[in-house]
Image (spheres, helix red, strand yellow):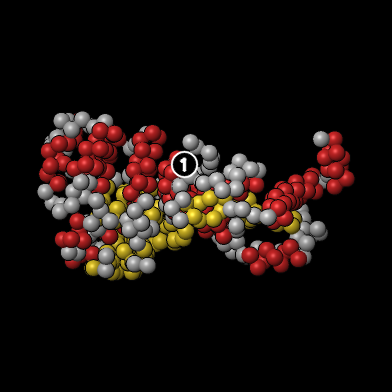
Amino acid sequence: MTTIINIENLTKSYKKQQVLTGVNWKIQQGDVVGLLGKNGAGKSTLLKSLLNMNEVDSGTITIFGEPHKQLTTQSKALIGYVPQENDEISWLSVRDLINFRKQFYPTWSDEKVTDLIGRWEIDITKKMAELSPGQVQRVLIILALAPMPKLLIFDEPAAALDPAGRRDFLKEILTLVSDEDITVIFSTHITSDLERIANKVAILDKGQICYFNDLDATKENVVQLTVHCKEEQNITIPNLLRGSKFAKGQYGIVSKLDKAWLTQMQNQAVEVTINPMGLEDIFLELTA
Amino acid sequence: MEQFIISASSGIPIYKQLYSQVERMVLNGYFPVGQQLPSVRQVASDLDVNPMTVSKAYGLLEERGYLTRLRGKGMIVNQRDEETLQQDKLSIIEVMIGELLSQAHHMGISQQEIIQIINRK
């Protein structure tokens, strides 16, 4: 597997506030990663640092195997980025903005642009400043997709979109990821957006990537357990995040379901019920 | 055509949801032997899910003998002997009965009472 992004010991602070306190993160080609984090966790800071739009305090970052501060022009052209807030020139019309941006890329698909503008009903004669937040976000997405990037980074891509707009956006990403070389990272606090498209989930909490795993494995591992014993019995649940006891039993949430322990319980005639949890609950438990 | 239904926000991974739906559809004859299943791309697009998820479900169904990959035709329902088929059906029912009995047990309902209900049906 090819490593697309490798981050080691990344730290970043703003004045006195330490935002990233040692991020280690490795992303492989073809991964579709959902980056979760509470408001203010530093998701945007992390993504901007990655793209060298922020000066970092310490640590190393490589993208496509190249140091992030010395990316070759070819590598830069392979990265698409959608910022959380519109940082494009707002007095340009959508048409002029597209023509302006087009000049910087060796691979630019006019076909993709025309198709998305038509489907997303964008009036290209309007100035960026005249568009609604949802339409602005759509234009930013089009600008990021047009150069046919191999690495796509979205910072809260769907925040300003209504449910139908979000679904359209997800569909577009899904079409893209059918091509297996494309790597996608998108930050969000809306877990339902990533449950359909991500294969991996990362959690940024207290300045670090505190969790990074397959989405399916996450749902299979982070579960709620109910343990029923025949009589009062002291049972220690492995990898317990949070739990409480009741007469002849226990209730708990684990970060990793221990299969060996489960078999051991079955042999002791202790009944363990496993209840799966949705990603939103999992996220809340892991960052509690 | 949307033959499958999934819930993305469920705690059960999407590939597992898809796996059990196809498994049942094969066992109840909705997908007869030799029937070609919709392509990975088709299912992914109908359900708005990652194609990798669909591949994972199909791969598992192939591994367990429900489907077989046919060159140029994609996945088709495998021909299997009656005995294996019956065993697979029974094991699904057994899991369901296990859950039922466990629930009943916690409510203090005896196996005898459950059998009475079954006999009334």
Callout 1, which amino acid? Leu
Residue sitting nearer the eye, A56 or A283: A283
Local crowd at mark 1 within 10 Å, few (<14), some, or many (≥20)?
some
Can residue A215 be seen here? The reply is no
Residue A221 lies, in percent from the top left, at: 56, 59
Quadrant assignment, res B46: top left
User: In what quadrant of the picture does the N terminus of chain A appear?
Assistant: bottom left
Residue at figure coordinates x 11%, y 48% from the top left: A103
Tell me the residue that label 1 is attached to. B47
- Left or right of A57 on screen, residue B92: right
* Position of A119 relative to A263 (above/below): above
Residue A22 lies, in percent from the top left, at: 36, 66
Residue sitting nearer the eye, A247 or B10: B10
Residue A241 lies, in percent from the top left, at: 57, 59
Can residue A12 be seen here? The reply is yes
Residue at figure coordinates x 51%, y 46% from the top left: B37
Residue at figure coordinates x 12%, y 42% from the top left: A99
- Left or right of A36 on screen, residue B93: right
- Left or right of A218 on screen, residue A1: left
Quadrant assignment, res A239: bottom right
Residue at figure coordinates x 29%, y 56% from the top left: A151
* Position of A140 relative to A130 (above/below): below
SS at badge 1: helix
Q: How many marks?
A: 1
On what subunit does the disc labeled 1 rest?
B
Residue A202 lies, in percent from the top left, at: 42, 57
